[in-house]
Image (tube, rainbow, N blue to C red):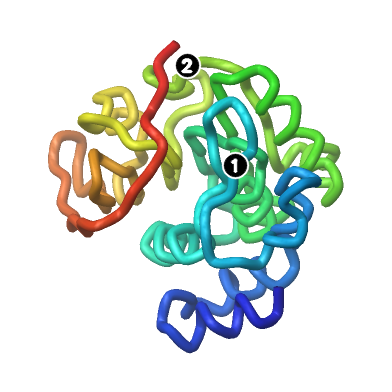
Amino acid sequence: MKQLVKDLISSGYLKTPAIIDAFQKIDRKDFVPEEYKDEAYVNAPLPIGHGQTISQPLTVAFMLEFLQPEPGNKILEIGSGSGWQTALLSYIVGDEGRVFALELIPELEVLGRKNVSRYNFVQKKIANFYCLNALNGLPEEAPFDRIVSAASSQEIPLAWKEQLKIGGRMIVPVKDSIYLVIKKSKNQFEGDVFPGFAFVPFVEK
């Protein structure tokens, strides 16, 4: 793990001390299936079953650096999978923060919750898991300081934009690009687009 983090730092993907600390403290090996444990520190996506993957470390680092999660943040995570990014975010937001992790596939929601429980984030109610379609976000917990998706949509769902706080940041894969969206006012957004990435598709049912 140390070498992987070192490589991500030297290649410029990991920069922020809090995110580096999370990568060092949250062991990716705890979130990959038994048969892939030996490949846990390879900079590549790995299968986690049900046609889904645990994202490539480089991609997770890239997205979190632009998301800029902070202590005390309330974060909506779309597609929590095996829970690695959920745990990274939970570590960063700390005891005063909350991560709401949405996962459509029941078996993965159970797996993610179990994996993240190893770090006590579920027990402390920092990480909160929901098995549901994320298309409508999580209106009962909105607004959110940050929103991040691990699956590629054809467009950014309107509900996510509405549930982002003014001043909040959202990182969402759209087709083969990563979109950074910053909410300036109720109907005004700015941001950036980073092409050249590959993601599993956003599943609605």
Q: Residue furthest top?
A: 205
To which residue does mark 2 refer? 133
Q: Residue at 47% of width from left, 16% of height from top?
A: 133
Between 79 and 161, the one nearer to me in the picture: 79
Q: Amino acid at mark 2?
A: Asn
Instruction: Provide the secondary structure element on which disc 2 rests.
Output: loop
To which residue does mark 1 refer? 47
Query: What is the quadrant of the C terminus in the image?
Result: top left
Q: Residue at 64% of width from left, 38% of height from top?
A: 48
Left or right: residue 117 versus residue 132 is right
Q: Amino acid at mark 1?
A: Pro
Earlier sequence position, callout 2 versus callout 1 = 1
Between 150 and 134, the one nearer to me in the picture: 150
Residue 4: quarter of image: bottom right
Q: Residue at 29% of width from left, 31% of height from top?
A: 153
* Structural crowding at the residue carrying mark 1, measured as other residues with C-alpha within 10 Å and reported as few (<14), some (14–19) or many (≥20): some
Q: Is residue 119 above or below residue 201?
A: below
